[in-house]
Image (spheres, helix red, strand yellow):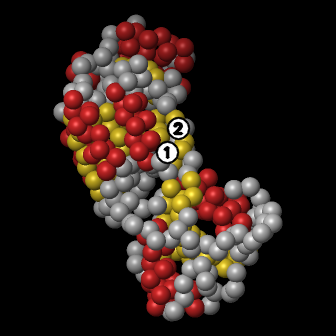
């Protein structure tokens, strides 16, 4: 077929290949001035030859002999973490998996240093060593590495996400905390405790997980009969803004923090002002940050279970790199006594 020869030639010269991926059938039909069916037949032939792989819903990927999905992979499990989250859970099972013949290679970044560039360097370097699996708390900053994740899968490597790096995760394999549910749970706890107002201390970030938590807050505030006084964002330890807001808190107000790091800063600021929770205000955080020994109430996920499920997926040979295994994990409430006790006979919704 002339079309097969043209495609083979243009693939070899990289004219129609970007990051290991080919254009769609319709785009190629327009380029070569032929029908989509003709391109599909040509792709079928090239797939039989081992030149490319067509994955429904994912795209068309170029393969070389060394990139064939059936190639034996190294029994190395790579992980990109952020701020040490999941680190202790992985360390706890490292020896267990070593006995099974698996090695862990972990790169841990802070939220400040999390970047697509460093992520890409680690993934490409580890890919050359033929890793079998990547567990990724991917950077949500543009340009995200979605094409690289697809290319790794086309080479037979599993890519398993443990954080939301894009708004639409429907094409990914993931094991995620249900952050929207966590925010909703925190707001309901505030309502059940009898507060009337909420002050939301949010992160100065546009990442998908920040938007998810804000959606959870907005979903419940009105239904719970609460008034959202204000939402303000802080970056790291900007205490002055928090102090100003605490100084003018009206009665029956709970402070809802994005994460426990911010919650601890709120507690410190309150102490400076002679205030305390729950005597003067309520305090609860949504995300329990790894490494923060929170002295205030917050939601939390069963991270040990998440890691167990991720690793089971990682080493299961029946699960292919293109299988969309997708699990959400509901969070529970950890009561540290910084919300007042619910009034007797409270009927404000289910928690």
Residue at image mark 1: 176
Q: Residue at horizontal 53%, vertical 38%?
A: 327
Q: Position of residue 5 (x, y in %)?
A: 34, 13
Q: Position of residue 2 (x, y in %)?
A: 39, 10
Q: Outermost residue, top direction?
A: 1
**Of the pair 341 and 31, the residue shown nearer to us:** 341
Q: Taking 101 as reference, is 34 above or below it?
A: above
Would residue 281 be seen by someone viewing this image from the given angle? Answer: yes
Left or right of residue 192, residue 144 in this image: left
Instruction: Give the position of the C terminus as an image quadrant.
Output: bottom right
Q: Residue at horizontal 40%, vertical 74%?
A: 236
Q: Residue at horizontal 31%, vertical 50%?
A: 88
Q: Residue at horizontal 37%, vertical 13%?
A: 46
Q: How far apart are marks 1 and 2 (CA)?
A: 6 Å
Q: Which mark is residue 307?
A: none
Q: Where is residue 143 in the image (x, y as percent from the top left)?
A: 40, 51
Circle nearer the N terminus (1, 2) = 1
Dot 1 alpha-carbon crowd within 10 angstroms: few under 14, some 14 to 19, many 20 or more? some
Would residue 18 be seen by someone viewing this image from the given angle? Answer: no
Q: Taking 234 as reference, is 218 above or below it?
A: above
Q: Taking 139 as reference, is 312 above or below it?
A: above
Instruction: Give the position of the N terminus as an image quadrant.
Output: top left
Q: Dots 1 and 2: beta carbons under 8 Å?
A: yes
Dot 2 alpha-carbon crowd within 10 angstroms: few under 14, some 14 to 19, many 20 or more? some
Left or right of residue 134, residue 121 in this image: left
Q: Taking 10 as reference, is 112 above or below it?
A: below
Residue at image mark 2: 327
The kind of secondary structure element at disc 2 is strand
């Amino acid at each position: 077929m002339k079309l097969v020869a043209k495609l083979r030639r243009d693939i070899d010269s990289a004219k129609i290949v970007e990051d290991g991926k080919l254009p769609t059938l319709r785009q190629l039909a327009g380029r070569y001035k032929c029908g989509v069916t003709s391109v599909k037949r040509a792709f079928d032939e090239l797939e039989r030859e081992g030149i490319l792989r067509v994955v429904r819903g994912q795209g068309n990927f170029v393969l070389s002999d060394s990139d064939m999905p059936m190639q034996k992979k190294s029994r190395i499990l790579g992980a990109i973490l952020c701020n040490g989250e999941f680190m202790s859970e992985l360390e706890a099972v490292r020896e267990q998996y070593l006995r099974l013949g698996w090695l862990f290679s972990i790169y841990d970044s802070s939220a400040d240093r999390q970047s697509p560039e460093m992520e890409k360097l680690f993934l490409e370097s580890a890919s050359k060593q033929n890793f079998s699996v990547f567990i990724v708390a991917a950077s949500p900053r543009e340009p995200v590495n979605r094409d690289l994740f697809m290319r790794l899968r086309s080479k037979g490597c599993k890519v398993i996400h443990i954080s939301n790096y894009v708004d639409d995760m429907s094409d990914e394999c993931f094991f995620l905390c249900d952050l929207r549910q966590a925010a909703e749970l925190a707001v309901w706890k505030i309502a059940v405790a009898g507060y009337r107002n909420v002050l939301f201390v949010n992160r100065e970030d546009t990442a998908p997980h920040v938007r998810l938590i804000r959606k959870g807050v907005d979903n419940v505030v009105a239904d719970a009969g609460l008034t959202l006084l204000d939402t303000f964002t802080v970056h790291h330890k900007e205490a002055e803004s928090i102090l100003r807001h605490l100084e003018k808190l009206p009665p029956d107000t709970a402070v809802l923090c994005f994460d426990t790091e911010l919650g601890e800063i709120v507690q410190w600021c309150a102490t400076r002002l002679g205030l305390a929770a729950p005597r003067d205000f309520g305090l609860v955080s949504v995300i329990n940050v790894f490494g923060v020994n929170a002295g205030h109430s917050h939601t939390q996920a069963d991270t040990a279970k998440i890691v167990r499920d991720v690793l089971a997926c990682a080493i299961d040979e029946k699960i292919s790199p293109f299988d969309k295994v997708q699990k959400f994990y509901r969070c529970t409430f950890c009561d540290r006594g910084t919300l007042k006790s619910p009034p007797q006979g409270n009927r404000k919704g289910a928690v």
